[in-house]
Image (cartoon, rainbow, N blue to C red):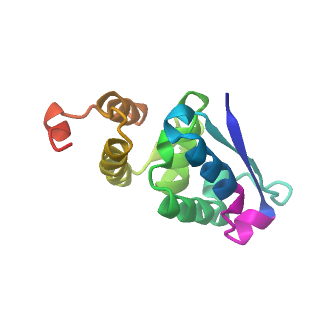
Amino acid sequence: MTIAIALNNDSINNLDLSPAQTVIDQLLQEGVASHEQQLSFDIKYDLEPGDPRELSEIPEVRLWFVRLDAKYPWLPFLLDWKAGEFARYAAMLVPHQFSSQDGIQYNPEALEIFLMHKIFILGDWLKQQDIPSLSRLRSMAQMLGYELDDALFEIF
């Protein structure tokens, strides 16, 4: 079951995390492990007619997601990866460009830093939650095109 967080111009422009906090706090109370990969964002952000930008190219939207990530750095655990929410989340936080032929093109160094940051955060957080992490962390890396060496996981 997908759970959507509704965002609009007001919440984004005011850096108001309350739409996300309400949903995430409820999931935490219910037991976060039972809501793995169920969260999505329903973003309604008005643009000027003819504005060709994607949501991840709008500074106000990106800043809202930066603030959300600072509050919930383990949020990728809850995102609906199959529906593309993890990739969209990464696009909000990692510098990139769009290509009509190749789609989204992340800055490679920034993507590596983002991925390793998330691996370390989620590795520790999953351990605190008593949730097995190895396959989840591997899958997350693979979603972004990376294969992680087994030696990395000996840290956890």
Q: Measured from the top left, where is residue 12 in percent x and y? A: 71, 64
In magenta, the rendered stretch is 10-19
Task: Verify whether residue 120 appears in magenta.
Answer: no
The structure residue drawn at horizontal position 21% and vertical position 42%, both measured from the top left corner, is 156
Residue lying furthest right:
49
Task: Give the quarter of the image for residue 59.
Answer: bottom right
Q: Measured from the top left, where is residue 99 in percent x and y? A: 55, 42
Q: Main secondary structure of the magenta part?
A: helix
- Image quarter hosting the N terminus: top right
Near-viewer residue (127 or 67): 127
Q: In this orientation, does residue 153 appear?
A: yes
Task: Verify whether residue 17 appears in magenta.
Answer: yes
The reply, left or right, for residue 42 in relation to residue 66 is right
Near-viewer residue (11 or 27): 27
The structure residue drawn at horizontal position 72% and vertical position 57%, both measured from the top left corner, is 19
The reply, left or right, for residue 45 in relation to residue 67 is right
The structure residue drawn at horizontal position 16% and vertical position 44%, both measured from the top left corner, is 155
Q: Measured from the top left, where is residue 72 in percent x and y? A: 50, 56
Q: In this orientation, does residue 78 appear?
A: no
Q: Is residue 56 above or below residue 79?
A: below
Tally of marks: 0
The reply, left or right, for residue 60 in relation to residue 116 is right
